[in-house]
Amino acid sequence: MIGPQVLMNSMANRSEVMLGQLGCGHLKKIESPRVLVGGLGMGITLKAVLDTLPASAQVVVSELNPTVVEWCRGPLAALTKNAVNDPRVTVEIGDVALRIRRTALNGGESRFDAIIIDLYRGPHAKTDSRNDPIYGSRAIEAMRSALKPCGVIAVWGENYDEGFDKRLHSAGFTVTTERSGRGALGHAVFLAHLKQTVNKDR
């Protein structure tokens, strides 16, 4: 917690599980898929990602705080069956926004089949629509460039944010939003599928 604000809760994690499952659901039968997870937290999302992916997958986790990684390898390990030490996982200490931009520049085989973003609060009405390092339009363009064809972005949000939804659409994604609770209740999971480019000359 930070003051009265809950950052992580091991007893209420339905939306994190949904995030990992939806973000990687299209990769169950793909050979050696590559997935980027931004934000480790308690490792709940990571475990859902690993449970959905094949044994040949490669998962890169970008986490700012090394103490969080120590928790997940220590007192929290049993919560996720030690997901952070799964042989498919590589943990990088650093800013996921920088990791995405680097991948977008390098391209090729460094790109990902899915980018899963699980950060505190998520997109919201006060997000800078252009310059926010994760949820702004420039960041979305970087994520698009960091994806392989037909890739997916899955983003956790404390609430639904219409502006973020529109920015994803404008960047060429097909977007759906799922709720972890009934009706309009619960946290939001934004699922953005990169549209397949059609070759009109064929």
Image: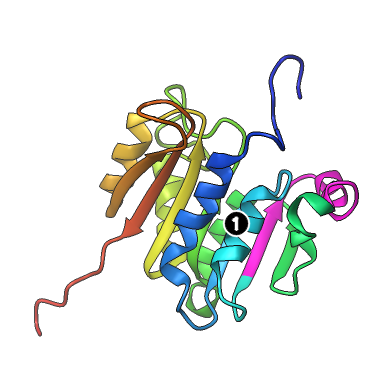
Task: Name the one closer to the observer, 188 or 169.
Answer: 188
Specify whether 103 is left or right of 169. Answer: right
In the rendered image, the vertical position of residue 51 relative to residue 168, given as above or below: below
Q: Residue at x 40, y 33 (%)?
A: 129
Q: Position of residue 60 (x, y in %)?
A: 65, 64
Q: Residue at x 70, y 33 (%)?
A: 9
In the rendered image, the vertical position of residue 53 relative to residue 140, given as above or below: below
The residue that disc 1 covers is 48
Q: Position of residue 18 (x, y in %)?
A: 50, 48
Q: Residue at x 46, y 79 (%)?
A: 30
User: Is residue 93 among the parts visible in the rendering?
Assistant: no
The colour mode here is rainbow
User: Is residue 106 among the parts visible in the rendering?
Assistant: yes
Membership of 175 in magenta stretch: no
Membership of 76 in magenta stretch: yes
State which quarter of the image contains the N terminus: top right
Which amino acid type is marked by label 1?
Answer: Ala
Q: Which residues are magenta?
A: 59-77
Q: Residue at x 48, y 45 (%)?
A: 155
State which quarter of the image contains the C terminus: bottom left
**Would you identify the image quadrant in which residue 193 lies?**
bottom left
